[in-house]
Image: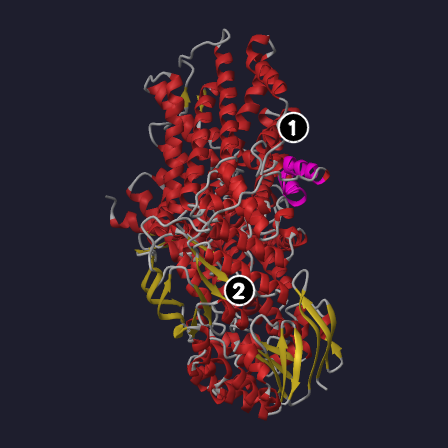
Amino acid sequence: MLLEVRELAVGYGGAPAILDIALDVDAGEIVSVIGPNGAGKSTLINAIAGLLRPQRGRIDLAGADLATLAPHRVCEHGVALVPEGRRLFTGMTVEENLEIGCYRPTARRNRAAGLERVYALFPVLAERRHQIAGTMSGGQQQMVAIGRALMAEPRLLLLDEPSLGLAPAIVGELFDVLRRIHAEGMAVLLVEQNVGQALDLADRAYVLEEGRIVAEGLPDSLLAQARIREVYLGV
Amino acid sequence: MSGIRPLPALVVLALAALLVAVPALGLPAFYVSFLYVACNWVSLATSWAMLSGYAGYWSFGHAAFFGVGVYAAGTLAAKLGVPFLLTIPAAAALSALLGAAVGFVVFRVKRLRGELFALMTISVTAVVATIISNTPIDGGSGVYLIGVALPELFGSQNGTIYLLGLGMAVIAMASSYAVAHSRLGLGLFAIHDDEDVAEVKGVPTFRYKLAAFALSAAIAGAVGAVYSIYVSYVTVSETFEITVTMYPVVMTILGGARNWAGPALGAVIVTSALYGLASGPQAYLGRGAIAIGLVLVILLLPQGVLTSIVNLWHRRHPRRIVVPSRVAPAIATPPRSGPAAVALDCRGVTKAFGGIQALKGVTLAVNAGEILGLVGPNGSGKSTLINVITGHYPIDRGSIAFEGARIDALPAHRVAALGIARSYQIPRPFNHLSVLDNVALAARFGTAHQPGGEAAAEAMHWLDYTGLAAKAADLPQQLNLHERKFLELARALAARPRLLLLDEVMSGLNPGEIDAALRLVRDIRDGGTTIVFVEHLMRAVVALSDRVAVLNEGALIALGTPQETMRDAEVVSVYLGKAHVA
Amino acid sequence: MPSATLLTQSLITGVLAGALYGLLALGLSLSWGLLRLVNIGHFAMALLGAYLTWYLGSALGIPPYVSGPVIVAAFFLYGVALHWVFMRFRVAEMASMLITFSIAVFLESVIQALWTADFRRYETAWASSSVVVGPFFVPTLNLAAAIMASVLAVLTWAWLRWTYVGKALRAGAEDAPIAAAFGINHRRLSYILSGVCAAYAGVAGVFIALIATLAPSEIWTWVGVVFAVVIIGRLGNPLGALAGGVLIGACEATTMAVADPAWAPLVSFSVLIALLLFKPRWI
């Protein structure tokens, strides 16, 4: 098992936003975590990426407990984050953003190869490599964010609501790219509000509601549950 | 937000009488001189703190206003023969004018407000000094005021000078006290903590900063005028010395920047220390020591002596707020013109941030008295819509009208005055104001525009309503997240808005609390307020809303009753994906 | 109106003076732009560096090309130490201004205590030499300062633009948590940057000693101008700092040639006010 999360609780000074989380991702798997807003999906993924310090629990990545590490040490163990809202370095160019992705020494050596790979996946970025990231469209920025994470040569790719604010057509393309990345053997943990795409893509899924995992299993079986419709649409 | 507890009036009066009588006591000149200098610094520090301490806009240019006062008096009295006592108000007026001019340019800039202001004030001082030095005002030779006539009180000119200095100190402290306990002061304190929120809650931030700055400059100018005759020979280098800029800063921070008497205390401490240490040619040593002292104070006692003492006192004797709450008959203040059918009319509202199109031509009319749920996936533009309605951002295209009048070009504090209030999804209270004052501010500056005493009662009512009455004297950081969310709500309600914009009030509540919140929102609407609320908890939206508006990617894709909209094919596909439209 | 030759000569002098402004502005701009710390003490440090250069040179006979590197290295350490204090006490942007302002006042007192308020001039062999280009005189030391300023500005720009540390600093300044997610320890890097900024103050100090007359109150005459240069050149932009300095220098020189030299201090202020009035979004 590549990633094992056990009894994770993460909060913001006071009551935990997520509680008692148990979650697994195996090498080469795509796992989706879905749930309505406010459920704690971002909190979960930010904790795994090292941006938040958990109050309790373990985040085991191939033997190392990420929960105890300082934020800048987490990526050394093979996770890379595509943050919610992309959070690019908007004053820097596309290529500079990608280069920050491979900042850690082991990835830095393969900078040229990494750039080639990203440009092959996203030809649009190759054309605009010297464009300032802040001037690009939402979809293009998302490509840069994914590319930046790929440059880190992770074993586990973390995506926080990649479809946020993107047009449906672009979302479709995006998820196709994720499929291709996955096909090359990458493990992916994805939190998404867009149930359709998220479950379409996933090997397995978890449902997060008000800070707890309330369901898990294969995508089809989850969708069959009327509960999901109720949670999302209220009717 | 009070100062030190009021000393027995008798002691104060006795002290005052003593101070006034000093020139007649026949004390050696050294002591009278010391008292005068102390009064001088009390005035300068107290005036500096009125903008810089209260609002947090640190000025490094107090010397400029002091210098304008010095040379105004010098020029008018020595060169133009104006009676000296008249030069004092003239000096104050000139300095105020300069302050207003500087403030007018600098306060309009939105980014780096604090730093830019500080740096501009440094520049202004250098410029004023240069102008005075290069023109006949000084011309490099200094100005002599020895021959200037002065009425002799207590038998000597020195006595008069001393009394003028004392008078300035009294005026400065009285002004500071008055400001601190006024609406202006409350606004300044709010600006210090969160200027943007203060503006949205109705504080006219630009005007207030300008007013405080001009007042502060005026007092400094008057002090300068008196100083000119005290030294009787003024030069540019001495007048615009770095000391005049630095000492008020030290004194205020040492004494307590948010306390009307703090700067005065700091001034007395520092002046005494300096007189004790060294003066004259060794003055720069004293300066150096004071500088180090300031560093230590900032690092170790950033609140200042007086505020720390006050806080300690309050910890030992916890305040109990005894303010009777008042039951409000209706929440919303009545509209100026008769009732309107459409409360809020958005047409073609468009807003982009850089390359991202946040709102794409949203057209939406909110009916008076309805509860409208605003939903949509993350990034669909809900928060942006709320922000442009309240005036936090200007729109690129389109129009927003409230009760028939256009509001999209108005500054946020005007929008608040017209009857719109909002709560923030992530609570943004004023951290240095008590819970009660946070709510009272909204009552004073919101639509209802209540005067001070009533605002407190009003605030108490809303704290009762939201269950926070017991915490009225606490600071926001002592509340947990739920309580802070209710504080947000109380703040929004205390403004007595006719349109209330709620941003995710329900998130984080348990089922019991959610039901209570639902009842609360209905009550508010029944009181006459139109409500637009952003929410992700769908069952709350469906239960509460008269109508639901669904945004996606900045565009309005559905509008109608909850049942209709949430079964609309496009809405379902947006949330669940196309395959699951059933 | 002065002749074209006179004007051009003024312009040359002005541009060179402006380059020195740029040199002073460099450390300040980096610190404010990338560390969010406003270092008013920067000027005092530069003046201290100048006094040290003069003293070591005049009293102890140590030439500036020997004392300079030592001073610069010592200042680097000072910068690291200062940043440590800021981190330890979690000092925010506004408080940093107050603290560095106090440091400036303190250093002014120290300078006055050690070397009195008398004007000091470092007399060196090159002090009066000039490079002659046609009818124009280019003072050698000023030229050296301008060259150093340009070299440092370009090197800094290249450092920020092309090295990993430079990119990491820029990324960390924009979004430290996400930068950390990619392995950037912005805290550690900021110590280095603080040291570099202080070192730049040292470099400026060495040249100030060679070119200008020293007095403790000089600190305050530069503050207004250099901050204007920083804002005009935009924060964190080394080439901007240089360009802004040259622009202000040129404007001042023109003003001095056409009007009374005593009005020069108003130039930078006026340019800044104009910028703020007509382009408040420049910042």
Q: Is residue B125 above or below residue B84?
A: below
Q: Amino acid at mark 2?
A: Glu
Q: Is residue B310 magenta?
A: yes
Outermost residue, top direction?
B155
Question: Overall secondary structure of the magenta stretch?
Answer: helix
Give the x, y percent position of residue B86. 37, 19
From the viewer's side, name the closer residue of B570 and A67.
Answer: B570
Mark 1 is surrounded, within 10 Å at the Cα level, by few (under 14), some (14 to 19) or many (20 or more) other residues, namely few
Disc 1: host chain: B
SS state under label 2: loop
Q: Is residue B285 above or below residue B484?
A: above
Mark 2 is surrounded, within 10 Å at the Cα level, by few (under 14), some (14 to 19) or many (20 or more) other residues, namely some
From the viewer's side, name the closer residue of B207 and A113.
Answer: B207
- Left/right placement of residue A117 relative to residue B4 reads left
SS state under label 1: helix
Please tell me in which quadrant of the rendered image residue B568 appears: bottom left
Q: Are marks 1 and 2 in contact (CB under 8 Å)?
A: no
Disc 2: host chain: B
> Which residue is the site of mark 2?
B504
Q: Is residue B354 above or below residue B443?
A: below
Q: Please say whether residue B95 is visible from this viewpoint.
A: yes
Colour theme: secondary structure
Q: CA distance from mark 1 to mark 2?
A: 55 Å
Outermost residue, bottom direction?
A183
From the viewer's side, name the closer residue of A99 and B88.
Answer: B88
Share a chain, discs 1 and 2?
yes
User: Magenta segment range?
Assistant: B293-315
Q: Amino acid at mark 1?
A: Ala
Mark carried by residue C213: none
Residue at 63% over, 77% down:
A208
> Which residue is the site of mark 1?
B273
